[in-house]
Amino acid sequence: MSDQVAIQLQKATKRFTSPNGKSFTALRDLDLTVAAGEFTAVVGPTGCGKSTTLALISGLEAPSAGTVRVFGEPVSAVGRSVGYVFQRDAVFPWKSVLDNVAMGPRMRGVDTGQANAEARQWIARVGLDGFERYYPHQLSGGMRKRVALAQTLINHPKILLMDEPFSALDVQTRALMENELLDLWASTGSSVVFVTHDLEEAIGMADRVVVITAGPGTVKGTYRVDLPRPRNIAEIRFQPRFIELYGEIWNDLRDEVLVSYERTKNRVAS
Amino acid sequence: MLVQVLRVVLAIVILGTWEITTRVGCYGPDSGTCVVDPFFFGQPSGIWTQLVKWVQVGTAQGPLWEQIAVTLEETVLGFAIGVVLGIIFGVALGRNRLLSDVLGPYIKAMNAMPRVVLGSIFTIALGLEMPSKVALAVVLVFFVVFFNAFQGVREVDRDLLANARILGASQRQLSRHVILPSALSWILASLHTSFGFALVGAIVGEYLGARKGIGLMIATAQGTFNANGVFAAMFILAVVAIVAEALVTKLEDRLIKWRPNAITEVSI
């Protein structure tokens, strides 16, 4: 891990205008710095603007105030060095596994033959060889996630953004995918921002855990996870240090979760 | 197997009842006791005789195949032009907010109008030949395809669009790789309905004034109180429609083999 700064958000604020004209602040004065090669997990209650943070870093959305920089450059459009794994299935249902994975290089002007060759390598790396000609609806949820991972990683993103990528998977598949992601990440050295609402997942995978407050989101606390790598997600949660960290961070997170819960309740009641 | 048998039985029961009620007591001295008068309601055997006569000696305005060919040509032309225009306008308005805001109310107003009345205008303006029928078919087809294409473009999954942009797609690549394939399933679903509309357009156009075509055969049969003739022409239309429906379904299966269960019209 180097000291180079990969991602820097300074006083980033994002407001949305809802269709009925009301303004809604998703993020307020968010400061976040991610070093190159660092795996950062962002946790927070539902609706705290975690996804919005990723949208700002990727360039899909522009901040209403504040600055967003990637490798020192202000983000003005969708960056070429960014990869994004979505919470929901975002693979293209009308494309086969091969065409889905080859999409990135092809969109970036690589000729079809070479793009397909690269895609085959990545399909093998995520353990899907033999499924090149399948369509997404013929695959299981876990397999579709693997397609999404290959589709993203084939572009060699220096910044990898992940928005609760495994939340829709069953527990066993999830642990498997988490380990595989850590292996793949170790070989790429990219900087990861991993959004999740699951604190165990966050501590298990990340170098650093950032707690975001209930919306409008801003940073409440940052915790360094000093657990050794390589890690096994299925077993790391039994280590004493893990449990200690969990207690510490949960203390912070619990209040925010309660705030968010109260608000939802009031909204339903009113 | 049971289903097929029951289908045949149903057809026999309906046609048999029709034939018997229009036959028993309808001929000879006691023709006053007739249950259903074949003069007004036709008769299966009479319809069959009419079909055979059309095939063997032709219709009042020429050979039968020529009438079918003319109607089909109008239908297919109207269908093709309507579909292409519908897709172009649907995608354009779906992608361009300003355009859809400006044109939206007019299109809604035009859609609310019973467009068959335009047939009269087209007959006056374009004459008794083919163009007036094609124009009516185009108008009927256009709106069905247009609304589906428009909706299809609007319903494109936002995550898919975002994903394609992240992967490096340009605006043109977005249209080709994400928006069109996504809208295609909506457009294809509309083709089933719209081919039927094209046929309606051609027939009504011919009915309003023509020199050839199945619609004219119906008008002629009506003018000579030939109920069997009307039913016989309907039978021909039904066959044409079923064949066309099968062709559209085949096209659909080819174009969207990626989809587990297609959005289609409610069908039985």
Image (spheres, coloured by chain):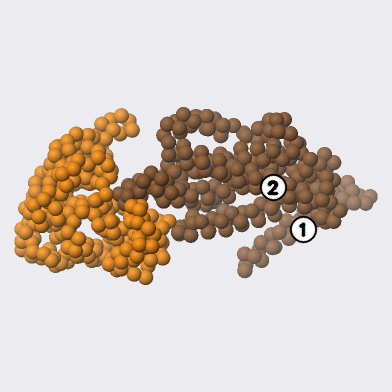
Chain colours: A orange, B brown
Residue at 22% x, 34% y is A64
- Left or right: A57 as drawn, with respect to B62: left
**Local SS, label 1:** helix
Q: Residues within 10 Å of mark 1 (few under 14, many from 20)?
A: some
Give the labeled residue for mark 2: B73
Secondary structure beneath dot 2 equals helix
Give the mark toward the camera: 1 or 2: 2
Q: Is residue A209 visible?
A: no
Question: Badge 2: few (under 14), some or many (20 or more) residues near its Cα, within 10 Å?
Answer: some
Q: Quadrant of the C terminus of chain B?
A: bottom right
Cα gap from disc 1 to disc 2, whole angstroms: 35 Å
Q: Position of residue A206 (x, y in %)?
A: 14, 57
Q: Position of residue A268 (x, y in %)?
A: 27, 39
Q: Is residue A22 above or below residue B37?
A: above
Residue under the image location 47 percent in, 38 percent down: B92
Res B123 → quadrant: top right
Q: Are marks 1 and 2 in contact (CB under 8 Å)?
A: no
Label located before the other in sequence (1 or 2):
1
Q: Residue furthest bottom?
A: A130
Residue identifier under label 1: B16
Q: Chain of mark 1?
A: B
Which residue is located at x 83 percent, y 45 percent? B61
Of residues B210 and A223, the one drawn nearer to the viewer in this rendering: B210
Q: Quadrant of the image for the N terminus of chain B?
A: bottom right
Q: Quadrant of residue B171?
A: top left
Instruction: Name the residue located 27 percent from the left edge and 42 percent from the top edge.
Output: A77
